Image (cartoon, rainbow, N blue to C red):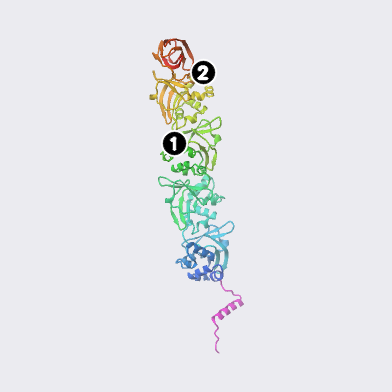
């Protein structure tokens, strides 16, 4: 009998019917039974067939995980590359791109963990898994939109983007052993952002030691750092949304990071070192396909610093000066504890004008850094803690700062008045000033450094520190010693405290001060007007005398004038006459028994006055010449006041 031959289709159908009849099911695979039937994965199907990879996905002995980009994902990739899906299918590395989407193990969604790193069949790169707190799953930057589409030889996870096996900034961190940073990025759910192949990023990457140092400074563990609620913001503060290579980093740059909380401040030193805030760049220009990585030796924090206070308040000249002096790393250190006395822009303009230079010249001064450090204390001092007469150590080693709090509540730092106080930052406090202070040696320093404690106390009590510490004004100060003050109060029958409380204390001190620098060699005999308004009498006979006070040390030179040490306190009460209105000659001078007085006008009376203002003799006279008996006077200096109808003359003479 002739055998009937059934068509192949009929045989297959019969076999399927037979298996169904006897309870045997056909084995499914991820390609034929998941990808091909899906209406959303037609581009993927075409790509697999084009790359001739369907056999691998149909392998019944395989155990696979397929990350399956949907059709929109292919459209988006084509747009990003400036082509179409057909152009994608013609890529020479299409097979490698597709194999980058396949794992050689079956991983359902429940088995995936945040930060997991998987090696796909294309081992040119790994896949970085993110599982968010809300349960969203990402493979690199692509989000899974349908999970656990199962077949007998594996599982398919549909996703909204095509992932590419290029080197990303995340890979730079992984490959260089920055394990803490990688863990932090995963914990903060930022792996999708930094693995995006079409991102353009600059990452400032702290090494493991940087995180360890941060934890130590905060007194916590690294795990505590990773649990910070603002971890994501801290990490985004290390990332720019553009590529900036090391050669493009600018000194004094204020750069917008992906964190909206604060800007980054960049420093490039004259030696070529690069800093981002307080952190120094160790390795530069580690290049990835989606950006650049520069490694840091410290973690930067998006906190408000004293530098931000200056920037936010428009103190642009100060900010430029700080950058020029390479001090941005110091003032952006989030763990510093600083007090900054911040001159405003007008203060810098005025300082330049006072020095006879331009503001640019001021910023080019070789001691600019020292000037700026003179405006900074290494501790926090609020306005309420500023003391009258305080002598405060600044970060500049050149000089101390002198503080004044007036009876009216005004606060001065040297000669500069505080305008705005207590502007608080996370690393300190800022007080704004109306002048730039300079670490120059002033007449105040001469008194302090030479142990003139009473004179210093008097200057403080009289609120003259601001005037005498002004670096832009020149003075001549006749400085009484402590013994001179002791002698003065003893003769007056008062105490030093009484003197310091005297209402005319400022006048007494200003009577010791000239408004110009006059060296001893430039002193001339005669009357000299003081800042108090009255004259002192300079006598160069037998030494240098100011009224009856002898100059015991001359020409203590300082930057804002000169100091001459005297052995007596000058009393403005003795200075009641204006400059001579008549010509008078005295001889001999010094005298022993008699002194002859000759005037160019008719003399009416003559007074002999001690240098503390006491009238010792009053002599009525007629004519233009007469002899005065001085044998009863003790040795020393006296004033002779000659009165005529046309005026008076005051002259000094000495008795041996």
* Up/down of 89 relative to 114, above or below: below
| Residue 283, numbered label | none
For the C terminus, give its image quadrant.
Answer: top left
* Up/down of 219 relative to 507, above or below: below
Look at 43% across and 24% down and name the residue there.
565
Residue at the bottom extreme of this rendering: 1
Look at 50% across and 67% down and name the residue there.
85
Whichever of callouts 1 and 2 sits on the residue coming sooner in the sequence is 1
Disc 2 residue crowd, few under 14, some 14–19, many 20+, Cα 10 Å: few
Asked whether 25 falls inside the magenta stretch, the response is yes
Disc 1 residue crowd, few under 14, some 14–19, many 20+, Cα 10 Å: few
| Residue 353, numbered label | 1
Q: Nearer the viewer, residue 619 or 117?
A: 619
Q: Position of residue 381 (x, y in %)?
A: 53, 37
Residue 4 visible in this rendered orientation of the protein: yes
Name the residue beneath numbered marker 2.
492
Q: Nearer the viewer, residue 217 or 398?
A: 398
Residue 395 visible in this rendered orientation of the protein: no
Asked whether 570 falls inside the magenta stretch, the response is no
Q: Position of residue 251 (x, y in %)?
A: 44, 46
Q: Please, what secondary structure does the residue beneath circle 1 have?
A: helix
Q: Which region of the structure is painted magenta?
A: 1-28
Q: Position of residue 644 (x, y in %)?
A: 45, 14
In this picture, residue 19 sits left or right of residue 473: right
């Amino acid at each position: 009998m002739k055998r009937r031959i059934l068509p192949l289709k009929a045989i297959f159908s019969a076999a399927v019917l037979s298996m169904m009849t006897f309870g045997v099911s056909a084995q499914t695979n991820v390609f034929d039974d998941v990808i091909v039937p899906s209406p959303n994965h037609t581009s993927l199907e075409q790509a697999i067939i084009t790359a001739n990879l369907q056999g691998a996905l149909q392998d019944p002995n395989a155990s696979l995980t397929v990350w399956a980009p949907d059709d929109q994902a292919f459209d988006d990739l084509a747009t990003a590359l400036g082509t179409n899906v057909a152009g994608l299918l013609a890529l020479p590395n299409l097979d490698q791109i597709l194999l980058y989407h396949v794992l050689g193990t079956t991983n359902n969604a429940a088995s995936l963990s945040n930060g997991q790193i998987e090696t796909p069949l294309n081992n040119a790169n790994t896949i970085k898994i993110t599982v968010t707190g809300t349960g969203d799953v990402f493979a690199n930057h692509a989000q899974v939109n349908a999970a656990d589409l199962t077949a007998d030889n594996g599982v398919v996870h549909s996703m909204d983007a095509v992932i590419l096996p290029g080197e990303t900034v995340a890979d730079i961190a992984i490959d260089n052993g920055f394990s803490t940073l990688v863990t932090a990025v995963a914990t903060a759910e930022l792996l999708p952002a930094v693995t995006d192949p079409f991102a353009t990023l600059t990452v400032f990457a702290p090494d493991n030691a940087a995180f360890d140092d941060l934890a130590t400074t905060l007194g916590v563990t690294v795990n505590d750092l990773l649990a910070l609620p603002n971890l994501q913001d801290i990490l985004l503060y290390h990332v720019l949304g553009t590529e900036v290579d090391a050669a493009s980093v600018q000194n004094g740059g204020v750069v917008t990071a992906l964190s909206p909380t604060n800007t980054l401040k960049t420093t490039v030193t004259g030696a070529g070192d690069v800093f981002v805030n307080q952190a120094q760049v160790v390795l530069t220009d580690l290049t990835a396909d989606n950006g650049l990585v520069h490694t840091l030796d410290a973690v930067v924090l998006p906190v408000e610093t004293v530098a931000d206070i200056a920037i936010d308040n428009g103190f642009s000249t100060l900010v430029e000066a700080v950058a020029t002096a390479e001090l941005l790393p110091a003032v952006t250190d989030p763990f510093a504890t600083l007090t900054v006395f911040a001159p405003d822009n007008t203060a810098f303009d005025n300082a330049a004008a006072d020095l006879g230079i331009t503001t640019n010249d001021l910023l080019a001064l070789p001691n600019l850094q020292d000037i700026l450090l003179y405006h900074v204390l290494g501790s926090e001092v609020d306005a309420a803690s500023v003391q009258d007469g305080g002598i405060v150590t600044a970060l500049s080693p050149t000089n101390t700062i002198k503080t004044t709090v007036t009876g009216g509540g005004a606060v001065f730092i040297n000669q500069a008045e505080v305008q705005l106080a207590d502007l608080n930052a996370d690393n300190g406090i800022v007080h704004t000033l109306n002048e730039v202070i300079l670490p120059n040696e002033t007449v105040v320093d001469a008194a302090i450094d030479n142990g003139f404690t009473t004179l210093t106390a008097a200057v403080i009590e009289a609120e003259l520190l601001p005037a005498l510490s002004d670096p832009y004004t020149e003075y001549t100060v006749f400085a009484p010693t402590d013994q001179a003050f002791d002698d003065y109060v003893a003769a007056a029958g008062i105490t030093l405290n009484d003197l310091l409380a005297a209402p005319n204390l400022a006048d007494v001190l200003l009577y010791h001060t000239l408004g110009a620098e006059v060296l001893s060699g430039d002193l001339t005999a005669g009357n000299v007007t003081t800042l108090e308004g009255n004259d002192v009498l300079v006598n160069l006979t037998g030494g240098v005398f100011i009224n009856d006070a002898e100059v015991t040390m001359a020409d203590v030179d300082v930057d804002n004038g000169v100091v001459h040490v005297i052995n007596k306190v000058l009393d403005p009460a003795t200075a009641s006459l204006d400059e001579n209105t008549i010509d008078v000659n005295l001889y001999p001078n010094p005298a022993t028994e008699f002194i002859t007085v000759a005037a160019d006008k008719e003399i009416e009376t003559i007074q002999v006055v001690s240098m503390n203002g006491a009238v010792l003799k009053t002599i009525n006279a007629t004519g233009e010449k007469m002899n005065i008996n001085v044998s009863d006077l003790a040795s020393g200096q006296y004033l002779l006041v000659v009165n005529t109808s046309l005026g008076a003359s005051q002259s000094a003479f000495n008795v041996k």
